[in-house]
Amino acid sequence: MRLAGKTAIVTGGGSGFGEGIARKFVAEGAWVLIADCDKEAGARVAASLGEMAHCIAADVTVDGDVAAMVQAALVEFGGLDILVNNAGIGQTPQPMEELGEETFDRIAQVNMKAIYLAARHVVPRFKQAKAGVILNMASTAGVSPRPNLTWYNASKGWVITATRSMAAELAPHGIRVNALNPVAGETPLLKTFMGEDTPEIRAKFLASIPLGRFSTPMDIGNAAAFLCSEEASMITGVALEVDGGRCI
């Protein structure tokens, strides 16, 4: 029970890696608020986790929704110890100059601006408490980028740099900030990255992962639980690769 008594927000917790993180956190004793723009998905996960989990419909790119999300955690749990900025979107593979401006803006809003908005509402509370943990979802794409995913890759590189900068600035206030760099996983985003889900394309992706499999939501949940626990109390500013060796 590494997170016993802790309270957490997990954005994008209604599916994929966010669901894996929410499930692991509850298993480790945490109270979890699942925030997702898909209200039904968030409610499904929360219901399956029982009284330790609650859900809220929230668009993490809208300041009012983020404020409501944080307030809901305070009302439901009486406090907040952990923020997991997991919500994210990808792009289909294509030459960089062909990606539409609307898609680029959406990538920037969900993968980057959402972290900024969450920080505006959470960091002052963590500073007042002189404690808190923030975990951002980056990607191996920010370390070892694949061709034709340039703007997604760039957004995840931004997350890694933001995480390191946040960690340096917030450490004197007792706040730790880390990131996870998953490799492609068995989540709804997998098909987006591959363009189409065929045995040939899957084989090509898997060939780049030395351990020979995609990541799973539980892989990411396990790593998240460690970084957000007291076992990692001396770890901040790290972007931990959970990638089966892809970035070696």
Image (cartoon, rainbow, N blue to C red):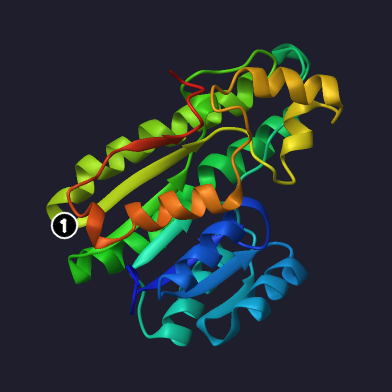
- Taking the image as shown, residue 10 lies to the left or right of residue 5, namely right
- Taking the image as shown, residue 84 lies to the left or right of residue 93, namely left
Q: Above or below — where is 80 with respect to 104?
A: below
Q: Number of callouts in the render?
A: 1
Between residues 192 and 64, which one lies in front from this camera angle? 192
Q: Is residue 100 visible?
A: no
Between residues 106 and 205, which one lies in front from this camera angle? 205
Q: Above or below — where is 27 with respect to 234?
A: below
Between residues 40 and 120, which one lies in front from this camera angle? 40
Between residues 134 and 28, which one lies in front from this camera angle? 28
For image coordinates 69% across by 43% down, the residue present is 186
For image coordinates 40% across by 33% down, the residue present is 160
For image coordinates 17% across by 65% down, the residue present is 130
Query: Residue 127's spot in the image, x, y percent?
Result: 22, 63
Q: Name which quarter of the figure residue 36 lies in.
A: bottom right
Query: Residue 102's spot in the image, x, y percent?
Result: 75, 34
Q: Name which quarter of the figure residue 166 lies in.
A: top left
**Quick one: which residue is furthest to the left in this view?**
172
Q: Which amino acid is tagged 1?
A: His
The residue to which callout 1 is attached is: 173
Query: Residue 129's spot in the image, x, y percent?
Result: 21, 71
For image coordinates 72% across by 73% down, the residue present is 44
At label 1, counting other C-alpha atoms closer than 10 Å, the crowd grade (few under 14, some 14-19, many 20 or more) is some
